[in-house]
Amino acid sequence: MRARASHLRALLSRALAPSLPPPPARALPQITGLGASPFGAAFLPRARFFSADASAAAQGGSKSPAAAATGGDGGADGQSGKSEQDAGKSVRGGVSYTACKSQLPVSWLSFLLLLLTGGGIIVYYDKEKKRHIEVSVPSPAELKNRNSAVKPGQSVGTAAIGGPFKLLNHDGKPVTEKDFLGKWTLLYFGFTHCPDICPDELQKMAAAIDKIKEKAKLDIVPVFITVDPERDTVEQVRDYVKEFHPDLIGLTGTKDEIRQVARAYRVYYMKTEEEGSDYLVDHSIVMYLMNPKMEFVKFYGKNYDTESLAHGIIKEIKERK
């Protein structure tokens, strides 16, 4: 047993020495008998592997100088032999480089295909985006046609302002919206106990309709509608409107009637600072220009003065004749 172990150590030393010649072929058959023992069964495959590797190394290093100097085919043979020798080198654990390369999760070919596919998707997306932008952006000719379709100052559609109502005028007679058909009408919502804003707006209205009649020979019907039906009776409204213009018509009614007409003309109003019978009413400060069909044309806010109000009404009427 000791003789066999010493003989095996000698074989391993020769196999690991690169300068030694390969072991004789008869050496391996001599140790085949080691497979009968557990020690031999464990080391026999490794002994064969190192023996084959040492044989290849010895053959590669035993070339003559004449063969190395031949060049041409000899150099090619040397390079091919070196490639085969490098390919045959083992890595840790006995796995070759070729086996490791084949087991990589992503190869260069699949990586190249991935790049090509991603690039193609990006190019396609850019082309579709440009095409969509070109389709959605109108040409100069189309823009010109669209601009000419609507003239400057022309209204597109009609606001949902106005509607039927039934009230009493300052003489106590029933009045509806039909009584104003065939006339241009200027409406203002307020209340007779208003301290400052309502008197200023009604004075501006009266001066504007006089100016319109003087400049354009147009008759405008001024109308005052109260938003305080509790205090603004027929007599109260009659005395109030006479202070501003002889043609000014005052209208009043019940709470429900005033609520209905205010809702139709989109007018806001609400009591504020109520102390018994003394209170103020917060409301919209707007004048509504209605055409002879009692259809809404335009509204004018507090920012209009007498001159601009008269000029604006004349312009709207002339554009619709």
Image (spheres, helix red, strand yellow):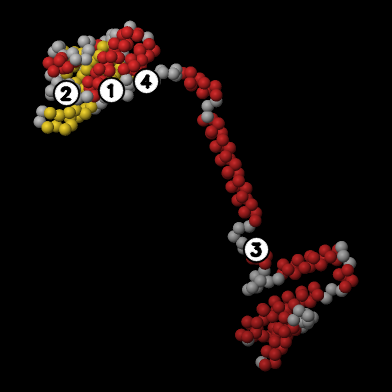
Q: CA distance from mark 1 to mark 3?
A: 86 Å
Q: CA distance from mark 3 to mark 2?
A: 99 Å
Query: What residue do we see at 26% from left, 20% from top?
Result: 201
Q: Which residue bears the numbered disc 3?
A: 101
Label 3 Cα crowd, 10 Å radius (few <14 / some 14-19 / many 20+):
few
Q: Which residue bears the numbered disc 2?
A: 193
Say whether disc 1 or disc 3 marks the residue closer to the N-terminus.
3
In the figure, is residue 151 to the left or right of 107? left
Can I make out residue 178 in this image? no
Q: CA distance from mark 4 to mark 2?
A: 37 Å
Name the residue type under label 1: Val
Name the residue type under label 4: Gly
Name the residue type under label 2: His
Query: What residue do we see at 39% from left, 20% from top?
Result: 156
Query: What residue do we see at 27% from left, 16% from top?
Result: 205
Secondary structure found at label 2: loop
Q: Looking at the figure, which quarter contains the C terminus?
A: top left
Q: Quadrant of residue 173?
A: top left
Say whether disc 4 or disc 1 marks the residue closer to the N-terminus.
4
Secondary structure found at label 1: loop
